[in-house]
Amino acid sequence: MDLTTLKAFKPAEFEEAADGYRAMSEMASEAKDTIDQRITAGIRRRLEGAAAKAALRELGDLSKNFHYMQTECGLAGAALNGFAFDMAVAKRKLDAALEDARASGCTVNSDGSVGFPAGRKPGDEKDADAGTVSGSAGGSPTSDALERQAMNLHPNPHYAKALGCANRIADALREATEADTKWAPKLRALKADDDLVVSDRDWADAKSDKAGVLDAARPYLGSIEAPPKDGTPDENAAWWKGLTEEQRSDYLAVHPGALGSLNGLPSDVRDEANRMVLAETKAAYQLELNAIPKEPVKYGPNPNGSYPAAVITAEWQAWRNTYAGEKERLEGVLRGMNAIQDRFDRTGRGGLPEAYLLGFDPVGLGDGKVILATGNPDTADHVGIYVPGTFSGIESIGEGEDHGDLGRNERLWAETTRLTPGQSVSTITWLDYNAPDNIAPQATNGQYADEGGPRLYDFLQGNRAAQETADGSRAHTTVIGHSYGSTVVGVSAQSGSWKDPSAANDFIFAGSPGVQADRAADLGVGAGHVWAMGGPWDDQVVRQGGRLVGLGDNLTIPTDSRFGGNVMKSDSGGHTGFFDDGSLSMRNQAAVIASQYDKVELD
């Protein structure tokens, strides 16, 4: 870059362009939300038939377009701010060098060389001639030492000042050229295919764009205060509140994964961040799956012509050894991601409110991470948080006609909403721990709860902080643990400053094998706000088995009278029936979530 161009460069013009892209990103986000939360939700509430389904498909594609536009425009804004930041650093160096040159009586030429006037050193009899010197960027310790020696030996005292200014000008021009060279391909890459279909490759390209912008924008992003290292939810909330709108937008554009996992941030921010991660991850997994060669024919005629007539082919065996495990893994995680998207697509059906993806990681701690809310917990009057148990994972998060653990969340919302007309309800499926994958030995071991309990505690504190940030109030919050999930909830209740009941008001334990406590009063909310229910058959096996292996202290489980909590009536036929639609078990849980304790039927 030449001197004239850098002198004329105005960082503010690029920052204004960045503001334009940020505004476009926000407009696309609002358009997407309008489609998803109002238009399509309204259609699902009121219309049925082929025309309605066709309209929903078209609107779904339009929503994807706006989502992709939101992501790419956000990246463009961050990139332009990053470019302006780098160029502003170079321009400030140039301006300072030019000012010093003028103050020293030197002149700067259009090629960056510096002219100096005639002058003499003290003791000399006559002036040394005027001259011009060209600077050099960078340098080494050896070249710098030689240059200092030349400055000292030169008979004109203005030579040293001129050369210093020329070198600083050369450095500024070099930095500006490097910034221009670095950012030009990054900015050119921020364009989509010339069509109206947002494909998996488009999202993969967006992920690549994000990595490129993040790498190039490190100096600019380094000027934005980073979230506190290992910060508490309150510290995270204060950090976010302290950023400008521009800084928030740029941080969201390049660090959605980090923002989506920060407890204490507003739910709508975490949702936006995690939906970006979901779209990019889903596309990447689908492309990986598509790249796996088609499964060969498994059986072929016996080449020996003997019995059996058909044998497993060598091609299939080689394919199985190389690809079968990876194919199964990819299909499982994609099944979970599709279940999350399906929940988004059910908004409006049966009055179901919008969903908020508060946490997402396809790998997580081994089982994947999915935290999904039905309704906004930041502004709700009542919040119920459901923690699933053994065998839970992203692959099965929405399985079956009842939509698995996501469906239990929805039924809890529907039942509680029926009890609370005029009030808002949010229910959350919380899967952010490594759930046991088998009964023995994993589900008989308390270490999974020991690791997951503190994570749930932090999430609850974050939920409280986000509520206080939203409107200064706190929702009535109930935490429901099913099966081994109740053990996680029990450890959570005894984590951190567990005697402070601010993050939870009630605990419900369904089919609990033990909560690593022998008294309800030890859980920090008061024994009168601890509830339990059990069932026959396999539920008895789970609860009594947990008692025997020590998941409850002193061989005590929550459905024991000596535990000291409330034992609710249940009509569950076994270990998995506590969340059946219309059941007494579900009504009792909803009554607690709604803080209508007089409606709870006790055993």
Image: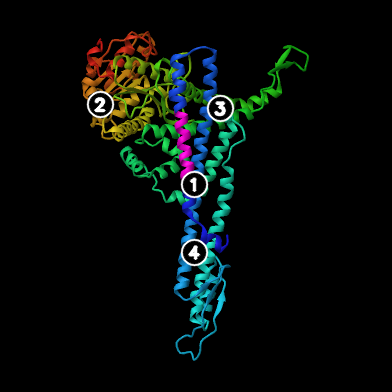
Q: Nearer the viewer, mark 1 or mark 4?
A: 1
Q: Nearer the viewer, residue 40 or 204?
A: 40
* Residue 229 is a magenta residue: no
Task: List the single residue furthest toward the bottom.
Answer: 125
- Characterize the local packing of mark 4: few (<14), some (14-19) or many (20 or more) Cα atoms within 10 angstroms: many
**Can the viewer see residue 64 in this picture?**
yes
Q: Nearer the viewer, mark 2 or mark 1?
A: 1
Task: Label 4: state its secondary structure.
Answer: helix
Q: How many marks?
A: 4
Task: Choose the circle earlier in sequence order: 3 or 4.
Answer: 4
Image vertical order of residue 162 relative to residue 238, above or below: below
Task: Label 1: state its secondary structure.
Answer: helix
Q: Disc 3 versus disc 4: distance between alpha carbons?
A: 53 Å
Q: Disc 2 versus disc 3: distance between alpha carbons?
A: 40 Å
Instruction: Give the image location of residue 335, x and y in percent.
Output: 52, 23
Q: Nearer the viewer, mark 3 or mark 1?
A: 1
Task: Choose the circle earlier in sequence order: 2 or 1.
Answer: 1
Identify residue for label 1: 17
Q: Residue type at mark 1?
A: Ala
Q: Disc 2 versus disc 1: distance between alpha carbons?
A: 54 Å
Q: Give the residues drawn in magenta, as a range.
A: 18-33
Q: Disc 3 versus disc 1: distance between alpha carbons?
A: 40 Å
- Residue at the spot 33% in from the left edge and 8% down from the top edge: 571
Identify residue for label 2: 523
Q: Which labelled disc corresponds to residue 521? A: none
Q: Nearer the viewer, mark 2 or mark 3?
A: 3
Task: Label 3: state its secondary structure.
Answer: helix
Identify residue for label 4: 94
Q: Do the residues under discs 2 and 3 have CB atoms within 8 angstroms?
A: no
